[in-house]
């Protein structure tokens, strides 16, 4: 079920990111990116707890970069912005740190279960 949650969230994120006229859920563009990638990172860590943190970061950074590259296609009527990708990567990195910190505090100083070393 956790894998389904992650893949569903990824599909919804890609739909909103690549639609020519997506609905505006949050007014601030960077807030949309941060919200999406915080959610994706948390779900990724939950669905795939044994994946090492740098694979989580790298995989989702590639997703964010691919979104920006596709948004540069003129026919989509979207705009590509490197700052959006920076926001995506920062959200992923900070979420990994937060997940690991919470689990370290909760699990007697051990975080080996989620977003592994």
Image (tube, grey):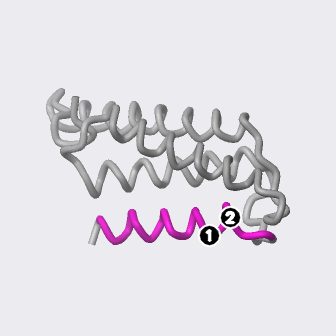
- Residue 110 in picture, x, y percent from top left: 16, 30
Return the x and y of residue 55 as percentages of the image width and height: 33, 38
Whether 89 is drawn above or below 29: the answer is above
- Apparent side of residue 89 relative to residue 43 in the rendered image (left or right): right
100 vs 78: above or below: above
Label 2: how many Cα within 10 Å (few below 14, some 14–19, many 20+)? some
Q: Position of residue 79 (x, y in %)?
A: 82, 51
Q: Residue at x 63, y 52 (%)?
A: 67
- Does dot 1 land on a helix, a strand or a loop? helix
Residue 4 part of the magenta-drawn span? yes
Disc 1 and disc 2 in contact, CB within 8 angstroms: yes
Crowding around mark 1 (Cα neighbors within 10 Å: few <14, some 14 to 19, many 20+) is: few
Residue 1, image x and y in percent? 27, 72
Q: Quadrant of residue 26?
A: bottom right
* Label tally: 2
Q: Which residue is mark 2?
A: 18
At 65% across and 49% down in the image, what residue appears? 33
Q: Residue at x 46, y 45 (%)?
A: 60
Q: Which residues are magenta?
A: 3-20
The C terminus lies in quadrant:
top left
Res 53 quadrant in image: top left
Is label 2 in a helix, a strand or a loop?
helix
Q: Which residue is labeled 1 in the image?
A: 15
Report how far apart the C-alphas of labels 1 and 2 lie in the structure: 5 Å
Residue 104 included in the magenta stretch of the image? no
């Amino acid at each position: 079920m956790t894998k389904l949650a992650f893949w569903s969230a990824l599909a919804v994120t890609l739909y909103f990111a690549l639609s020519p006229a997506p609905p505006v859920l949050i007014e601030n563009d960077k807030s949309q990116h941060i919200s999406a990638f915080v959610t994706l990172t948390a779900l990724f860590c939950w669905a795939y707890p044994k994946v090492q943190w740098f694979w989580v970061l790298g995989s989702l950074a590639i997703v964010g970069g691919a979104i920006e590259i596709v948004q540069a296609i003129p026919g989509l009527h979207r705009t590509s912005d490197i700052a959006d990708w920076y926001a995506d990567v920062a959200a992923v990195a900070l979420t990994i740190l937060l997940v690991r910190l919470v689990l370290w505090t909760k699990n007697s100083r051990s975080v080996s279960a989620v977003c592994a070393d």
